[in-house]
Image (tube, rainbow, N blue to C red):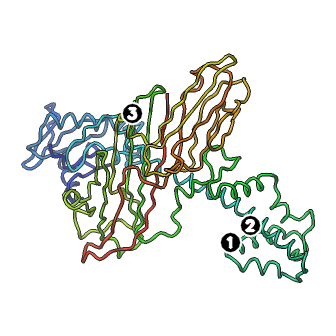
Amino acid sequence: MVLLAAAVCTKAGKALVSRQFVEMTRTRVEGLLAAFPKLMNTGKQHTFVETESVRYVYQPLEKLYMVLVTTKNSNILEDLETLRLFSRVIPEYCRMLEESEISEHCFDLIFAFDEIVALGYRENVNLAQIRTFTEMDSHEEKVFRAVRETQEREAKAEMRRKAKELQQARRDAERGKKSPGFGGFGSTSSSSSSSAIITDTLIEAEKPKPAPAPIRPSGSSKALKLGARGKEVDDFVDKLKSEGENIILPHTGKRPSEASKSLPAPVNTESVHLRVEEKITLICGRDGGLQNMEVLGMITLRVSDEKNGRIRLLINNNDKRGVQLQTHPNVDKKLFTAESLIGLKNPDKSFPLNNDVGVLKWRLQTTDESLIPLTINCWPSESGSGCDVNIEYELQEESLELNDVVISIPIPSGVGAPVIGDLDGEYRHDSRRNVLEWCLPVVDVKNKTGSLEFSIAGQPNDFFPVNVSFVSKGNYSDIQVAKVSQVDGSSPVRFSTETSFVVDKYEIL
């Protein structure tokens, strides 16, 4: 079948939502839909009507119509099957089949339509898969919020550390020689812009004081309170010295503070900015055997300068696992297949400005255990007083560097804290959630294996399911943008890239 367009229209032929799968002008689509009600015979019951050039396959939806516009040589049985799937998708997003409800959820419907048909041909998907694929885009918001939260936490920690450094510098300066005026501030604030920011923060905090406190502050000074809010500052500095920059803040329950380094924020982005994002869903049995593993990836393009709107992206695909690639309907699929170039079908058009456009998606689904990036083995064995649990990890994909790895093991409630034996990394015991979290700042080829042993009262089944979370600024499928060039002249264009690989679900049952 060749599907030209799918639309939801009123009985008068007014288009509410229309998605074209081939190159068609808006005037032609509106003309076809306006002519549709006039072609139906009221005395006959059919699900299709034809003209000299196209065929309309339709289904009434109360006061509306779900209409597919196809070529006349398409298979009518496939058309009807596709029509039924389109009709089942609409109630998934719209509670009432009314014009206002359709208009409110128009983009949700368009995204769902794109999953059903690509380039005019039906995709082999069902309703559950469509729901899964459309929900995939929502992970961008989760990544953005996680990055913003970790940035705020790191900024506060950095502020405390800088304040402590400033106070120490003041003490050292006053022990040797007292400096009048704001000399102490001048010497430290000129060293870096970040110090200047901290200085301004301290002065702002001391505004209620009559004097700007150029002299050594007393014990009640707010500047001293900022640098000495408890042991968390000392813990932060000690861990900074002992572990480099791989730090896990003790008060963070969801994610350690290195998330912003694994998922860098777009600070210095070029006018052409690309995001290469992947997420993994994995379910594995406790006795071995991979039940399901799915990796979903997307390359998102954002153009902020009009002169760089007409560009092409050279994709470097080094994947050897057999991922399934899918380009955007407006992308020239033949050009991508032949030369691995992503460009619009009409080279005279430009990519949308200041909008995130998903130009390439890929998917890998497998039950091959050799493709698991991080294997987890949990061995609980019963003893006289309870259970001895030994849990191990091994990084199978050595090209990856995983940050903020947290392996969460459920433990029985009401039996107290576990007794920890051998340990690689750190651990946290959350008594409220009855979870033991094994925290590893970095897992890479240098420390690809590790183990944790603990003892606690309970049965072997009490320690499952084990959940794993991590982030990585590497790419599992090894699909990257190698070059960006202009359509005219093929001159190179400067671009910036963000890469992230995150966990959607990683569970050992």
Instruction: Judge whether residue 124 can be spotted in this image.
Output: yes
Provide the secondary structure element on which disc 3 rests: strand
406 vs 500, left or right, is right
- Which residue is depicted at the point 48% across and 38% down? 505
Element class at badge 1: helix
The reply to whether the C-beta atoms of the residues labelled 1 and 2 are less than 8 Å apart is: yes
Residue type, mark 2 in image: Lys
Q: Is residue 479 left or right of residue 437?
A: left
Question: At label 3, which amino acid type do we have?
Answer: Asn
Disc 3 versus disc 1: distance between alpha carbons?
Answer: 47 Å
| Residue at which label 3 appears | 292
Residue at label 2? Answer: 162
Q: Nearer the viewer, residue 269 or 470?
A: 470
Give the numbered dot on residue 194.
1
User: In front: 491, or 28?
Assistant: 491
Question: Which of marks 1 and 3 precedes in the sequence?
Answer: 1
Q: Amino acid at mark 1?
A: Ser
